[in-house]
Amino acid sequence: MRPRWLIVLGALGVIVLNVVVFVAFWPPPTPPPDASPAQRLYFAHCLTCHGPSGNGSWRATLFLIRPGNLADPRRMRALSDEYLFDIIKHGGAPIGNPGMPAFGFHLSDAQIQDLVRFLRALPRKE
Ligand code: HEC
């Protein structure tokens, strides 16, 4: 006969797996119907980590990702447009912040520029 603790452990494993899958695939919010193209890009690519208003998402917190606060006016003022463009296009890895993925393969330069303008407006939205 199989020891009972093995069955209990298996059941616990299934529960934990369910919670992880549930959290990872919980559908993120959709953009408002009147969203601009840049806002749609943000919702599609950035929101899972940076949150709807730029100050981080619960999902990121849960996975111990610390994406900073893109809605903090003082912080954003200190960052140049070139810096924002580069970190979106090439990700954070080249400057030692590997948490931020690169989007150069998914987005055109024009789309990234659009996103930079969108980020500039984030602190004022709150
Ligand atoms: C997988 C999660 C993730 C996604 C998706 C993501 N980011 Fe990030 N981002 C991060 C993390 C983590 C950092 C912080 C890197 C660090 O400083 O260590 C970051 C940093 C940044 C920064 C720099 C902030 C600063 O203060 O230096 C900008 C700007 C940024 N992200 C914009 C975006 C945009 C725009 C998108 C969508 C195209 C996006 N991110 C998608 C995780 C993510």
Image (tube, helix red, strand yellow):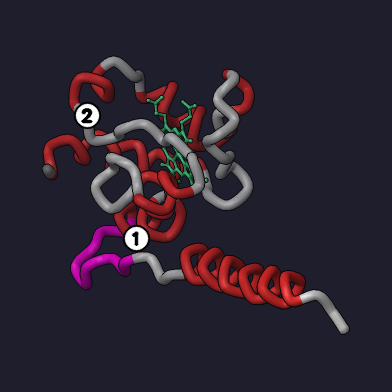
Mark 1 is on which residue type? Answer: Arg
Q: Is residue 1 left or right of residue 15?
A: right
- As drawn, which residue projects farthest toward the top? 78
Q: Who's the residue at 59% across and 20% down the image?
A: 96
Residue 111 falls within the magenta-colored stretch: no
Q: Percent x, y for residue 48?
A: 42, 54
Q: Disc 2 on helix, strand or loop?
A: loop
Whether ligand 1 has any atom under 8 Å from the Cβ at mark 2 is answered as no
Q: Which mark is residue 72?
A: 2
Q: Percent x, y for residue 76?
A: 27, 24
Q: Which mark is residue 40?
A: 1
Q: Disc 1 on helix, strand or loop?
A: helix
Mark 2 is on which residue type? Answer: Asp
Sequence-wise, which precedes: disc 1 or disc 2? 1
Q: Who's the residue at 39% across and 56% down the image?
A: 41
- Quadrant of res 119: top left
Viewer-closest of 104 and 98:
98
What are the residue bounds of the magenta stretch? Answer: 29-37
Q: Who's the residue at 63% across and 47% down the image?
A: 105
Q: Who's the residue at 31% across and 66% down the image?
A: 29
Q: Percent x, y for residue 54?
A: 29, 42
- Quadrant of res 117: top left
Binning the other alpha carbons within 10 Å of mark 2 as few (below 14), some (14 to 19) or many (20 upward) gives: some
Q: Percent x, y for residue 64?
A: 49, 40
Q: Disc 1 to disc 2, how far (Cα)?
A: 21 Å
